[in-house]
Image (cartoon, rainbow, N blue to C red):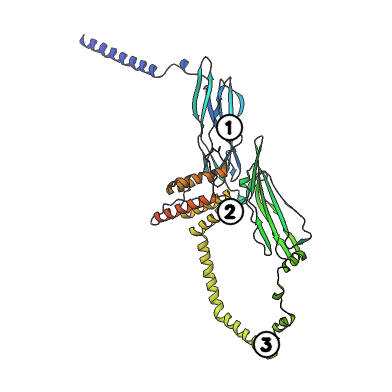
Amino acid sequence: MRRTELRWAVLMALVFLFGMLAIASFAQEPPESEEPEGPLPVMIRSSLTPETGVYVGQKVRLHVEVLTNTWFTKAPQFPELRIPHAICLELSQFGVNFTERIQGETYAAQRKEYVIYAQRAESYSVPSLTVNIVYARPGEPHGEVTLNSPPQKFEAQIPEKAKGVDYFVTTPRLQVNEEYDRGFDDLKVGDSLIRTITMIADDSVGMLLPPLDFGPTEGLGVYPASPRMEDESNRGVYTGKRFESVTYVMEKEGDYTLPEITIHWFDLQSEELKTETLSAVELSVAVNPDLEQEMLGFLEEEDVEPEEEIAATQKRPLDVKSLLYLILALVLLFTALWIFLIPYLKRCVAWWKRRRSIQAESEEAYFKRFRKSCNKGDPKEIMQSFLNWLDKIYPGPGAATIDDFVRRADDLELQALAKGLDDELYGKQEIDESHTEWSARDFYRTVSQARKRLLKKEKSKVKPFGLQPLNP
């Protein structure tokens, strides 16, 4: 009997144990009938167009969509998009409303579109955007929730056919036109000629179009004006415009050639590297009698030498013997130069070229280029030269950003000016009454001060990090 009772006791204990395990499993996992079915009442999603095969300077669209199965009681609040080494813009201040059927339910949706222009050949991470959503709940107070859009990634590359080009524009269509304020006939000393060049690119922005270098011309005064940029958006299509203007002043009579201007661009439709060329212009400048008469009026009569004094100062011709001695002396001089000085001069020239090459790639040379760009005041050129200088002061395999430099400098004024430069390039926010205009001169001053401190601090040990060059 004892053995039988023991067996029954063990059997009851096992039954009790399995029963408790079954109850615990049911308590942890609710029945399938109690699980929510269908889509959620509020959703967020994001996507890129295109996702692959992106070239530097090509427009990439970021779509961020929020959806609710009721309706929005307040417009969703979308944040600003910022990505290092890329230009980010909003296609429209307002979102696009639409409806969509999901699993048999009708959803009210709103889409926010951003455009991204990569400026370097590298991998880009599109951050998650936080959107505040207020939606209706029938029979209950409205719901409010904050959702984060899924992050995205894309790779920007330089087209094979564009490698080696100093600068190119990525666009499906580029137009380049030029006009002059007057004809080329009857140009005289003292006249002026205004040349205006207009560049228009589809699916691009004005800040991506190249600045033009008109260069000096002997005998002509060359005075470039500050470039002007305009961006237009029509039904989601961006058009970037850049206007370059220069004034030529005729300083001397003679024949002149205004050199041709070549602009490279990569055609996204044919995937071919193309060029737009403005032909060279021939100018003929004549003497201006009216201007000469005006200049002669300033001369005093006593300053004009009599004809007798002019004749007395004329050089007398050399005789034959003196001419032979002069030729012999010149031959001996050139022979000595050829034998002794030419090899030495060649070595000096080679040393000088090597030294110039080293100096041209030094940190100091890149900082001088940054200073020159600040003097010009073009935000895009300032950003380009500033990033190139950072590559020199912080060399290494990684990518350094302006935020890294500002953080190391620990300068609040520099931080504000760097933010101002970013706004000048990628678009300003609403300006309050305390806002002050961004100054290239102040930006250079604060960077120069930070440079002195950081070079002194990191003279013994420089932390290696660097930047890749912008659109090469």
Choose the circle earlier in sequence order: 1 or 3: 1
Tell us which disc is closer to us: 2 or 1: 2
Residue 335 in the image, given as x and y percentages of width and height: 59, 83
| Amino acid type at image mark 3 | Leu
Residue 95 in the image, given as x and y percentages of width and height: 60, 30
Residue 111 in the image, given as x and y percentages of width and height: 59, 30
Q: Is residue 113 above or below residue 73?
A: below
Mark 1, residue position: 112
Q: Secondary structure at mark 3?
A: helix
Q: How far is the residue under mark 2 from the one under mark 1?
A: 36 Å
Q: Secondary structure at mark 2?
A: helix
Quarter holding the N terminus is: top left
Residue 53: image quadrant is top right
Mark 2, residue position: 376
Q: Residues within 10 Å of mark 2 (few under 14, many from 20)?
A: some
Q: Is residue 345 above or below residue 111?
A: below
Q: Nearer the viewer, residue 190 or 29?
A: 190
Choose the circle earlier in sequence order: 3 or 2: 3
State the residue at coordinates (64%, 35%).
Answer: 236
